[in-house]
Image (tube, rainbow, N blue to C red):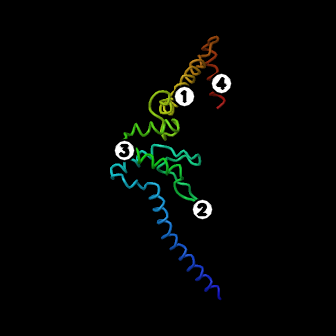
Amino acid sequence: MTSLGNSALAVRRAAIAALFMAVALPRAVIAQQGAITAPAANLTAEQAAHAEALGKKLKCMCGGCEEAAGMCTHSGGDYAGPCDTAKGELAEIDKQVANGASDDQVLRSFIKEYGPTVLIEPPKQGFSLLAWVMPIALPVVAVLLVWGVVQRWREKNQLAPAGGPSIDPELLARAHRESEADE
């Protein structure tokens, strides 16, 4: 085969591969998303949306990721998609929502089972409030501290007018005359 024939074959193979990826990849992503957010069959649309929102507030406790249970995906290898732990958490959320449990009741049941680390966001109360306040308060305090140190440094090191004996006006006039003569 000629080099022109080889390049045409290579272009054809690349086009087929691109077409395959354009068709297969979106289908795989949609299938994976459906596996993550597939509601239980006994939930209404409103309950399913409610359960999905709760699934995004709770961390997947598998230890292999730091994602929310409703967003857990283990990509690559032979296995891709939500892990069994995330599926179990989502099933438990669906069950509790179907039984009419409030958000607070669902979250407390998971905190009771896994501890407060199961929450994606720390609660905005008690000691956990520091996690919300410190990112704002710490830079403000640091800027104020640096500003205070600079102000004290400037006050301490201000230049004072030079002291010493006064200059005799006759000597000053003579220096001016001599500097004009040098020019």
Q: Disc 1 to disc 2, how far (Cα)?
A: 49 Å
N-term-proximal mark, 3 vs 1: 3
At label 1, the amino acid type is: Ala
Quarter of the image containing the N terminus?
bottom right
Q: Give the spatial CA distance, label 4 vs label 2.
A: 95 Å
Q: How far apart are the two marked residues, 1 and 4, measured between alpha carbons?
A: 56 Å
- Tag nearer the camera, 3 or 2: 3
Q: Say whether disc 1 or disc 2 marks the residue closer to the N-terminus.
A: 2
- Secondary element at tag 4: helix
> In the picture provided, is 32 more to the left or to the right than 182?
left
Quadrant of the rendered structure where residue 170 is? Answer: top right
Q: Are marks 3 and 1 in contact (CB under 8 Å)?
A: no
Report the front residue among 3 and 36: 36
Q: Residues within 10 Å of mark 1 (few under 14, many from 20)?
A: few
Q: State which tag comes first along the sequence, 1 or 4.
A: 1
Q: Residue at x 63, y 83 (%)?
A: 6
Residue positioned 43% across, 54% down in the render? 37
Q: Position of residue 40 (x, y in %)?
A: 40, 53
Q: Which residue in the structure is indicated by mark 4?
A: 178
Secondary element at image label 2:
loop
Foreground of the two, 59 or 125:
59
Q: Nearer the viewer, residue 127 or 32?
A: 32
Residue at horizontal 61 percent and vertical 81 percent from the top = 7
Q: CA distance from mark 3 to mark 2?
A: 36 Å
Instruction: State the SS at label 3.
Output: loop
Return the residue at label 3. 99
121 versus 95 height, above or below: above
The residue labelled by disc 1 is 142
Category of crowding for the residue at label 3, using alpha-carbon neighbours closer than 10 angstroms: few (below 14), some (14–19), many (at least 20): few
179 vs 111, left or right, is right
**Going by the picture, which residue comes out furthest to the bottom?**
1
